Amino acid sequence: MSPGANELPLFPLNVVLFPGMVLPLHIFEPRYRLMIAECRKEHKPFGIVLARPDSTFIHEETYSVGTTAEIREIDELEDGRFILMAIGLERFRILSWHRKKAYLSGLVEPYEDIPESSQLLASSMKQAQGLFETYLNMLLEAAGKDTMEISLPTLPQELSYFIAYLLGAEDELKQQLLELTSTLKRLEEEITFLRREVPFMRQMLIGESHFAENPDRSMLN
């Protein structure tokens, strides 16, 4: 057994949770109501893992890297369902899966980033911050809301998780970012994504503005 390995209840979802991020959950399946009730009683976290596309109710297939989640707020409804807020704590890698109870669980070990040059991280962090602020404000503008000054995490790893969680990207790409063991590489991948998305969104907003000012009357006939 790997040093630091421990048993963890696993909750397969179509979402990728990152450390430090908040996830609202509605727990209605009996097996996961049992899992939450036990975690609540024992004051233990559970693991959020991305379900693979071919996963089924009976044969649950997940990716091998996930994030532990701690229950911060919880309401139990009269019919036994739970409405809760969970926060991501740390990443783990699954060593083995099993089903000793009604729900999936596994033997997991900590999964961490490697140490890296603070100078290189600072440079990539600055680029990522600027692009992401522009990206978020464009999302607000597209939604018809006022832009705002955004308070972003000040540590490279925390920023890389924050950006990854909020990117409008496919779950598979977010899973790839979660599995990286380099904060620098994660920031660089996010910079590449944002450099592609920001110009696209800018053109989209310009196009919407042009149409609003110069509607194509032929479309109305």
Image (spheres, helix red, strand yellow):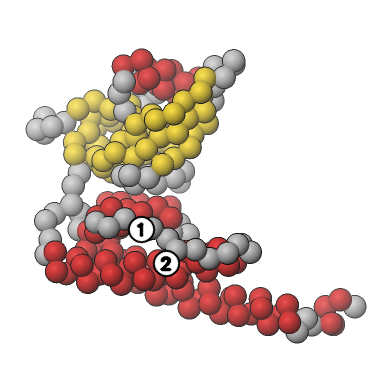
Q: How many numbered callouts?
A: 2
Q: Nearer the viewer, residue 19 or 46?
A: 19
Give the residue at x 59% y 75%: 205
Give the residue at x 53% y 77%: 202
The label number, if any, that marks residue 152 in the structure image: 1
Give the residue at x 36% y 27%: 104
Contact check, label 2 and label 1, Cβ < 8 Å: yes
Give the residue at x 14% y 69%: 119
Considering only vertical position in the picture, is 81 above or below 179? above
Left or right of 210: which side holds 129?
left
Q: Whole-percent x and y of residue 189?
A: 31, 66
Any part of residue 54 in sight? no
Q: Whole-percent x and y of residue 32?
A: 45, 24
Of the image marks 2 and 1, the number of the one nearer the N terminus = 2
The crowd level at tag 1 (other Cα within 10 Å; few <14, some 14-19, many 20+) is few
Q: Whole-percent x and y of residue 82?
A: 51, 24
The crowd level at tag 2 (other Cα within 10 Å; few <14, some 14-19, many 20+) is some
Residue under numbered circle 2: 133
